[in-house]
Amino acid sequence: MRGETWVDADIDELCLSFLVRQAWLNMRGAMDGALSGLGLSVAQYASLLVLADQPGITIADLARAVASTRQSANELLAGLADQGLVERRRHPTDGRSQQVFLTDAGRERLEEARPVVRERERELEAGFSQEERRLARQWLRRMTGDQPA
């Protein structure tokens, strides 16, 4: 690749991790724009998704699920709590932990956001065939460990 820019390189020679990072940054920017009208960031939307799937998850587990630090998750949850979207409760068996739950308002906001995210994703995928979209999702799921090889 000497003398070439990364854009001009043979597709098989490109650094995969760099491409994934660039794709994530572009998608995050696009999603931030789509979600801003609902008063949500991408990280907040991801947190609402996790909480809908795993009610009562601890803050530490939520941080791991959204690839964040515990401190960042606490700050993010404070913002969601200020909006009345989540509530924290003392863990019943671990006095040092808190559990987090969606409120009714949090579930409503999540349901408002889902079609906004789906529409933005459809726009971003417009140039891809159904098979390309399926393969991309399959590859990403394998890379995250959500699907066996």
Image (cartoon, rainbow, N blue to C red):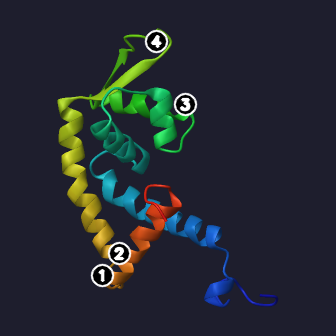
Residue that carries the numbered disc 1 in the rendered image: 130
Secondary structure at badge 3 equals helix
Mark 4 closeness class: few <14, some 14–19, many ≥20 residues within 10 Å: few
Of the numbered discs 4 and 2, the one sitting upstream in the chain is: 4
CA–CA distance in space, label 3 to label 2: 33 Å
State the residue at coordinates (52%, 62%).
143
Q: Nearer the viewer, residue 53 or 5?
A: 53
Residue that carries the numbered disc 4 in the rendered image: 94
CA–CA distance in space, label 3 to label 4: 17 Å
Secondary structure at badge 2 equals helix
| Amino acid on which the number 2 mark rests in the picture | Arg
State the residue at coordinates (50%, 29%).
60
Of the numbered discs 3 and 2, the one sitting upstream in the chain is: 3
CB-based contact (under 8 Å), mark 2 and mark 1? yes
CA–CA distance in space, label 3 to label 1: 38 Å
Q: Position of residue 69 (x, y in %)?
A: 57, 36
Residue that carries the numbered disc 2 in the rendered image: 134
| Amino acid on which the number 4 mark rests in the picture | Asp
Residue that carries the numbered disc 3 in the rendered image: 70
Mark 2 closeness class: few <14, some 14–19, many ≥20 residues within 10 Å: few
Name the mark nearer the viewer: 3 or 1: 1
Of the numbered discs 3 and 1, the one sitting upstream in the chain is: 3
Q: Is residue 41 above or below residue 30?
A: above
Of the numbered discs 3 and 4, the one sitting upstream in the chain is: 3
User: Quadrant of residue 117 in the image?
Assistant: bottom left
Q: Nearer the viewer, residue 84 or 45?
A: 45
State the residue at coordinates (17%, 31%).
104
Q: Is residue 3 left or right of residue 52?
A: right
